[in-house]
Amino acid sequence: MSRKLAASVLILAASLVAALSLRAQNGTSGNSREELRIAKQVRHEIVIEPYLNVFDSVNFNVDGPNVTLTGAVTQPTVKNDIVKSVKRIEGVQHVDDQIKVLPPSPADQRIRRALFRSIYRYPPLQKYAGPVVKPIQIIVDSGHVTLEGVVDSESDKNLVQLRANSVPGIFSVTDNLQVVKP
């Protein structure tokens, strides 16, 4: 299987899992089409945010007309843009903004760059570097790392964890990666 095809399969699998588990991952009760419609639109607004990058992670919960946004971003403008766009969605009455803006830190920036190189430039993991929206998010907060997203095998998940733990200056690594079977 070519690398391009493998990357496409991974993206398709990740999208399928996200779509199938939208209610479970994002806390929708699933009792109404309106909640599912709002959840779909919230997800769309997050995904199209142009300045959201591999070092940001935004999640959401939909409860009727109320949306709760959680996660962490490196730029306050990203947080503000997402909150504004979610508030404009038809049917949303209240947005509970719990997105954390990570403090600017030269040490955290160094760790982010080192983690990106360690994970995405490592030959067995380069298949994850291809998509514009990276499947592995790297959140660094005061030297503490959280890995979020999807990989296609348990061995890749372990390899990402190993690569992250090899970067100097990290206090802890929390692995929230999910394995998606293509």
Image (cartoon, rainbow, N blue to C red):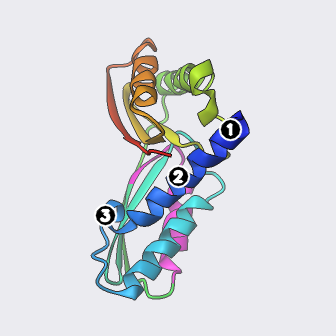
Residue 33 percent across, percent down from the top left: 40, 86
Residue drawn 34% across the image and 33% down it: 175
Does the stretch in magenta take in 41? no
Q: Provide the residue span drawn in magenta.
A: 71-89
**Residue 83 or residue 157, whichever sits in front:** 157
Residue 146 percent across, percent down from the top left: 37, 35
**Residue 67 or residue 31, whichever sits in front:** 31
Label 1 sits on a secondary structure element that is loop
* Residue at mark 3 to residue at mark 2: CA–CA distance: 17 Å
The numbered mark at residue 13 is 2
Badge 1 is on which residue? Answer: 130
Three-letter code, disc 3: Ala
Q: Nearer the viewer, mark 1 or mark 2?
A: 2
Residue 138 percent across, percent down from the top left: 47, 35
Assess disc 3: are there few (<14), some (14-19) or many (≥20) residues with their C-alpha within 10 Å of its C-alpha: few
* Residue at mark 3 to residue at mark 1: CA–CA distance: 28 Å
Up-down relation of residue 171 to residue 134 (above or below): above
Badge 3 is on which residue? Answer: 24
Horizontal side, residue 50 vs residue 47: left or right: right
Q: Quadrant of the N terminus?
A: top right
Q: Main secondary structure of the magenta part?
A: helix
Residue drawn 59% across the image and 35% down it: 128
Quarter holding residue 32? bottom left
Residue drawn 52% across the image and 52% down it: 13
Up-down relation of residue 121 to residue 98 (above or below): above
First along the sequence among labels 3 and 1: 3
Three-letter code, disc 1: Gly
Residue 133 at least partly seen: no
